[in-house]
Amino acid sequence: MTKPQYEKATFAGGCFWCMVSPFDEREGIKEIVAGYTGGVTENPSYKEVVSGKTGHREAVQIVFNPEVFPYEDLLKL
């Protein structure tokens, strides 16, 4: 049996907690990490990010098995 070949996809927009729930506990999704992307401030706090002054966006990175859950399905969600 071969090991699954996982891929990563990163999506930014809105509240990252709202972006976690559609993918949570779906077959083929190995891991979901919430965080920030972009921006100019190193290691910003949540309060700094939501102020809009750091240039960051809330994001999720999804580790998935495209054989089970194709990238196109991630986009649909």
Image (cartoon, rainbow, N blue to C red):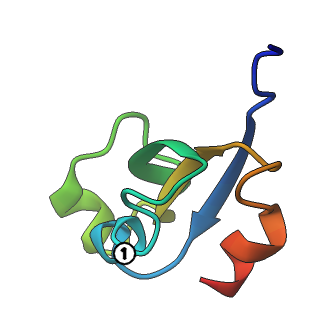
Question: Which residue is drawn at the image coordinates 76% and 27% (left, top)?
Answer: 4
In the image, residue 66 lies at what x, y percent? Answer: 80, 50
Q: Nearer the viewer, residue 54 or 15?
A: 15
For residue 50, which quarter of the picture?
bottom left
In the image, residue 18 lies at what x, y percent? Answer: 32, 77
73 to 28, vertically: above or below:
below
Outermost residue to the left: 47
Question: Which residue is drawn at the image coordinates 28% and 68% (left, top)?
Answer: 17
30 to 58, vertically: above or below:
above
Question: Which residue is drawn at the image coordinates 70% and 52% (left, top)?
Answer: 9
Crowdedness near tag 1: few (<14), some (14–19) or many (≥20) residues, C-alpha within 10 Å:
few
Residue under label 1: 52
Q: Quadrant of the C terminus?
A: bottom right
Amino acid found under the numbered disc labelled 1: Gly
For residue 3, which quarter of the picture?
top right
Whether residue 55 is visible, yes or no, is yes
Q: Secondary structure at mark 1?
A: loop
35 to 76, vertically: above or below:
above
How many numbered marks appear? Answer: 1
Q: Nearer the viewer, residue 67 or 74?
A: 67
Outermost residue to the front: 1
Question: Which residue is drawn at the image coordinates 33% and 70% (left, top)?
Answer: 21
Whether residue 39 is visible, yes or no, is no
In the image, residue 2 lies at what x, y percent? Answer: 83, 15
Left or right: 23 in relation to 66: left
Q: Nearer the viewer, residue 26 or 46?
A: 26
Q: Quadrant of the N terminus?
A: top right
10 to 8, vertically: above or below:
below
Left or right: 19 in relation to 1: left
In the image, residue 65 lies at what x, y percent? Answer: 72, 43
